[in-house]
Amino acid sequence: MCVRRRPGAAVRNARIVTVSGPAIDKGTVVLRHGLIEAVGANVAVPPDAMVVEGEGLIVYPGLIDGLSTWGMPGAAPAAATATAGRGGRGQTTTTTATPATPAAPTAQAAASTRARGPEDRPATTSWLKAADEISPTDRRIETARSAGFTTAVTFPTTGIFAGQGAVIDLLSGQKPGEMVVASPAGQYISLSRGGGFGGGMGGGFPGSLMGAIAYVRQIYLDAEHYKLVKEAYARDPRGMTRPEYDRALEGVLESKQILLPANRLVEIDRMLRFAAELKQRAILYGAREGYRPEAADLLKKAGAPVLVSLHWPEASRDANPEDVDSLRTLETRDQAASAPGLLKKAGVAFALYSDGLDQPRDLQRAVKKAIDAGLSRADALRALTLSPAEMYGVADRLGSIEKGKIANLVVTKGELFDDQTRVQFIFVDGRKYTPAAETPATGGRGPVTEAPGVNQ
């Protein structure tokens, strides 16, 4: 296989925040072939390297979004397939979605594929891999990169068993395969009524939260039986009926961990118990009530990592002014941003994720809100770098500035999460990018005065 060599680069005389070790007040980072070749206070700059003068600048590891749809076309699978029969062995109806206008099945099509029970595999595309669906032309990649994000753990999110995620580097204009760092990263599971079942897809099974949980439980029972039958057949196939291939169960078995939704305290408790029952390594996501002491105690006892949403709850702009919110709702709006700091104090492994926030200013404000609510700057940075890398088993490649790791860096003028700080440069796989011009507050993309992009 031919490996394309990438040009070398160096950022010198800058403050370097390594995350995994002490900061270097005035040091140099050398990048070559997409990797960090050297980092330190007394590192020589190779004569053929492109040099970035770092006086007055700060170098951080590239930020990692621990749960995202960046790079997924239309924030959903490119082809949404409704199936009948086990593992899609029945008739299939496929509709193609585009980033601009995701396709939606007609009422007639939804009715014709209405699930009658778990044997129909409703809202399941567990075999779908984000790594096979990546679109380098997703405009959100450039926007996220301008906020300092160089990596995302991106997932399909349509359905109950939505599919398997991938750790990707946020490159533009490259082949999708060049973006993938690790795959699969885990199976995304949703229990929401809006996740492609119940009233949202013409009714049918499962039509409630209890039904969805029962369905997930049944899938894992089926998967365990399927695995045992396959193993028995592999040991001695003579005289034994060949097991029928089931891609839904194959996708479940291939997933080394699952992501389960848990915002409220009761959901955190329920999903921890559910993961233990399923005997699956689980990452909980959401954690809006992670500020409650009982939630931290449950997570600490279970040793379960959690992804905390940066989309802090707030009142809807379209809410009826006559409506009166519950005390619990008001408390959650007020306290949710304190969850990361309290989880850190309790010793719970956590990371932060964007949860639909795409604009650099919105992401910066959300992180700053957590800092103002008690999370230290160092812990906020770790929750967006090394912690998600550890959570997904890629800390040997990402998350800190160390020799041999992937050359993902963000270079800023000022402390990363300060209101006035601006990203100067971003390196992804050693490729240097300049941030896009900010979108005007009135909406729309607006003019770009300097064409952002990769400077090879």
Image: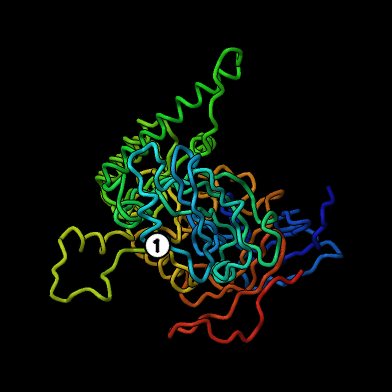
Residue 9 point in image, percent of width and height: 77, 64
Q: Vertical placement of 44 versus 314: above or below?
A: above
Name the residue located 37 percent from the left edge and 59 percent from the top edge: 108
* Amino acid on which disc 1 is placed: Thr
Query: Is residue 94 or residue 396 the one in the foreground?
Result: 94
- The quadrant in which residue 169 appears is bottom right
Name the residue located 45 percent from the left edge and 24 percent from the top edge: 225
Name the residue located 36 percent from the left edge and 65 percent from the top edge: 372
Q: Secondary structure at mark 1?
A: loop
Q: Which residue is mark 1?
A: 106
On the rendered structure, is 87 left or right of 448? left
* Residue 382 at least partly seen: no
On the rendered structure, is 41 left or right of 393? right
Residue 17 point in image, percent of width and height: 59, 59
On the rendered structure, is 414 left or right of 116? right
* Residue 419 at least partly seen: yes
Query: Is residue 215 or residue 443 the one in the foreground?
Result: 215
